[in-house]
Amino acid sequence: MVLNWQMVGAMVLPNIGGWAGALSMIGEVTSADGNAWYERLRKPTWTPPNWVFGPTWVILYTAMGYASYLIYEDCGGFTDEAVIPLGLYGVQLLLNWFWTPVFFKLHQMGWAFLQMCILDGVTMACIASFFDINKMAAAYMVPYLGWLAFASCLNYSFWMMNREDIEKMPLK
């Protein structure tokens, strides 16, 4: 059995960006003294525990990467047919990666929410373009879109619950 390095690369690439984004959260989510920025925020009761996010993103990023690989293969590589779906995939991936530092490092919940709304739209367009080429690839992206919808609601709730205190919180 020969290992398909293109497939592995497609599945690892989204995770690399996710891991890089996670580095921007160091010192912002938890701290020994309980005084990290995220710890001080008011949160909706339906906020998942912190440990849920890492495994969820690994699964979602891996599925997204596999979906992009299916499109790449079905289009015969980076052909004219692949430009729009893989371009949309790349744009939504970049928007995804940059959301974390905007929210956690810069503490810009409103801008993060706007970015998330744009990300939601680009992801829907990406899924639609995948569907025209490979329905299974589109299906691999649907759980991600569901998580984005949940994350959008969560981001909005954080913003609304903390907007009056944001100006009072130091950036460090």
Image (tube, grey):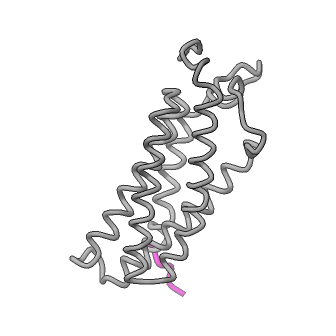
Looking at the image, residue 143 lies above or below residue 45: below
Q: In which quarter of the image is the C terminus?
A: top right
Identify the residue at horizontal 56%, vertical 62% (top origin).
Answer: 144
Query: What secondary structure characterizes most of the magenta part?
Result: loop
On the image, which quarter does residue 57 sit in?
Answer: bottom right
Locate residue 30, reporting x and y percent: 71, 29
Residue 96, above or below 137:
above
Q: How many labels does the image show?
A: 0
Q: Residue at x 54, y 87 (%)?
A: 1
Q: Position of residue 63 (x, y in %)?
A: 55, 68
- Examine the structure image and report whether residue 3 is included in the region drawn in magenta: yes
Q: Magenta segment: does it hold 18?
A: no
> Which is more toward the observer, 81 or 156?
156
Look at the image and give the residue range highlighted in magenta. 1-5
Farthest residue, direction bottom: 1
Q: Position of residue 150 (x, y in %)?
A: 62, 53
Residue at x 48% of width, y 83% of height: 135
Frontmost residue, 4 versus 89: 89
Task: Report whether 149 appears left or right of 83.
Answer: right
Where residue 24 appears, as percent x and y from the top left, is: 53, 34
Give the camera-side residue of 4 and 53: 53
Residue 50 placement: quadrant: top right
